[in-house]
Amino acid sequence: MSKIEVSEVSSRRDRDAFIEFPWRIYVNDPAWVPPLIIERKAFLNRKRHPFYLHGDAALFLARSGSRRSEIVGRIMASDDPNYNSLHQTNVGCFGLFECMNDHQVAAALFDAAADWLRKKGRTEIMGPIDYSTNYVCGLLIDGFQFPPTILTAHNPPYYRDLIEGCGFAKIKDWYAWWFDDPAKAVTHLRRLATRFNTRCPAVIRPANLNNIRDESRRLREIYNQAWKKNWGFVPFTEAEIEFMTEELKPLLVPEFAWVAEVDDEPAGFILAVPDINVALRHINGRLTTFGLPIGLLQLLYHKSRTRTAQFIALGVIEKYRRTGIAEMLVLRIVEDAMINDLPIPRSDWGTALQNVSHLQQINRVSEY
């Protein structure tokens, strides 16, 4: 390939080119889910996204050709002081990486991201991480045939070679799981929940979706306590949880949101949503065509017929671990999904479901 030029995104035109570049990478990938363009614009909006209240990020485009007119790659570099303060590290992140199958292009993109982070005083770089581990992260290395569910990563197989060829090494394994036999899982979970509940009499209540703002603040407190010792954890800020709540609000259903309490004190929660990616596959990233809401109508049509779902979060405060609360929360969602003919959610919690009393009715489908 001819000489590569990498430049920082500084105009609306470049931002739009940054957002639209994946369409070139995945044109022949039947598993790819085109992102909703309006959502991507909001995600990258420095004035709107709450990450920029405490962190910083920069977008870069790689161009080639005689007039440097052909876009051949993109990358984001992000700096999260909250992460470094918590973990006593000096790390920056790369994310939103998309690239032609060319080592020269990949190297140029990583050099640009590293230079930007170096000027921030960072001495290490890790990824793919979009802002922080509270958003999409990970590099898919197995399970390319499966379409990604909401908030999960998808990429071509050759990305691993490009990234490792630029000196990166794997730091953590991450898995996606499906329930292989939900009916058997319910039987097993019910038995465990009955046994454990005598040890820790927890109450499982539905999340208050009618007052989602206050409820989301309570869930944030549980999450930040429950996940604080997990790899890569960085606490959600209040602004971030409000932003994510607004993003997920149209997808929330009562059967998929539960809170555990012990003696009226919060002990844990679980949240899942129908997988909107199933519907997004049909609209090519756009809600309107020639000013008509064709994409929106298609989105609503396919959303109502979605037969997959995604666990968003499961958190149990440390002192209530190994008391059956996690099992009871998973049981409530799976059982209600079966009773109400709702989709059985998939998990992308790394090894989390492996640790739900060694549950045997789960099947690994993807690895990151």
Image (tube, rainbow, N blue to C red):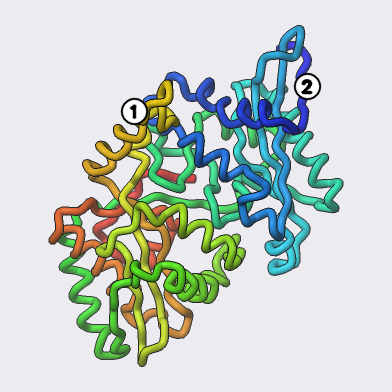
Write the residue at 33% across / 78% down: 325
Labels 1 and 2: the sequence-earlier one: 2
Mark 1 crowd level (few <14, some 14–19, many ≥20, 10 Å Cα): some
Q: Quadrant of residue 16?
A: top right
Secondary element type, mark 1: helix
Q: Quadrant of residue 291?
A: top left
Write the residue at 25% across / 90% down: 198
**Residue flagged by tag 2: what amino acid is it?**
Glu
Disc 1 vs disc 2: which is toward the camera?
1
In the image, residue 79 above or below residue 9:
below
- In the image, 61: left or right of 97? right
What is the quadrant of the N terminus in the image? Answer: top right
Residue 53 tag number: none
* Disc 1: which residue: 294
Residue 121 on image: x %, y %? 85, 53
Which of the two residues, 192 or 33, is positioned nearer the viewer here?
Answer: 33
* Disc 2: which residue: 5
In the image, residue 220 above or below residue 262:
above
Q: Quadrant of residue 356?
A: bottom left
Residue 203 on image: x %, y %? 29, 83
Q: Given the current orientation, which residue lies at the most extreme top position?
A: 66
Residue 22 on image: x %, y %? 54, 27
Which of the two residues, 363 or 69, is positioned nearer the viewer here?
Answer: 69
Q: Given the current orientation, which residue lies at the most extreme front position?
A: 291
Write the residue at 86% across / 46% down: 119
- In the image, 2: left or right of 353? right
